[in-house]
Amino acid sequence: MVRFSPAPPNQTRGHGRRKPPRSGIIGLSALPMWRRVQVMDSQTIEILGRNRLVDQLLLAGLEVAFPARDRGIDLIAYVDLEATVSRFTATPIQMKAASARAFSLDRKYAKIANLILAYVWGVQEPEHAIIYALTYPEAVAVAEAMGWTKTESWAKGQYATSAPSKALCILLKPYIMSSAAWWSRIAGANAVVSL
């Protein structure tokens, strides 16, 4: 946890400069408030990640619904207007948010049909946040390419890393999402083409 103890304006030394904060974190008081917050609990990270994901889905022209119970689906992205799709189309999404970067895969998600795993990285710095979206089979293919499916951890049902390698980032690059990519991923073949 970061403690703040900037010197009051009247406690200066020398040429009008402030004393360093007593907390030992030098220069922290000069940072904007949003940069001072360095430790987030898992609930905050999840909320920020979900909001970032929902923003991107809504900007894509998609609708979002939240299941009443948590059975492995965090939200459902869908398209329902006849002018945009030929039929109602919905896709379940399991979101994995990280304040910096993290990738994980759990075998329990194999049972959910058409599930998209959305990895939201960098929620602590929104200007650098990035979202990757993979189907479960695509995520397993990445895990196989990384050699994770041969590990003891995977044998127990899951694999996770909080320090993604350059090789992993290269494998994930095709799955970077944008509004256009989300529309294509969710509406897909059901999108109405305007001539």
Image: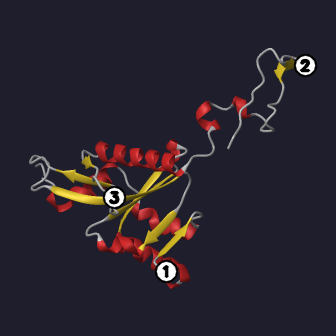
Kindly identify which numbered label has been placed on residue 57: none
Residue 109 location in percent, x, y? 36, 70
- 190 relative position to 52: left or right: left
Task: Give the amino acid at mark 3.
Answer: Asp
- 167 relative position to 182: left or right: right
- Give the residue displayed 9% in from the left and 55% down from the top: 86
- Give the residue displayed 30% in from the left and 51% down from the top: 180
Q: Residues within 10 Å of mark 3 (few under 14, many from 20)?
A: few
Q: Secondary structure at mark 3?
A: loop
Q: How many numbered marks, from 0 up?
A: 3
Quadrant of residue 91 within the rendered picture:
bottom left
Task: Give the amino acid at mark 2.
Answer: Gly
In this rendering, is residue 101 above or below 35? below
Q: Nearer the viewer, residue 168 or 100?
A: 100
Q: Secondary structure at mark 2?
A: loop
Please tell me whether mark 2 or mark 1 is closer to you in this view: 1
Q: Secondary structure at mark 1?
A: loop
Q: Residues within 10 Å of mark 1 (few under 14, many from 20)?
A: few
Quadrant of residue 88 within the rendered picture:
bottom left
Which badge, 2 or 1, comes first in the chain's sequence?
2
Residue 112 location in percent, x, y? 29, 69
Kindly identify which numbered label has been placed on residue 14: 2
Q: Nearer the viewer, residue 65 or 188?
A: 65
Q: Nearer the viewer, residue 26 or 73?
A: 73
Marks 3 and 2, how far apart in space? 59 Å
Most extreme residue toward the top is 10
Badge 1 is on which residue? Answer: 156
Q: Residues within 10 Å of mark 2 (few under 14, many from 20)?
A: few
Badge 3 is on which residue? Answer: 70
In this rendering, is residue 33 above or below 102? above
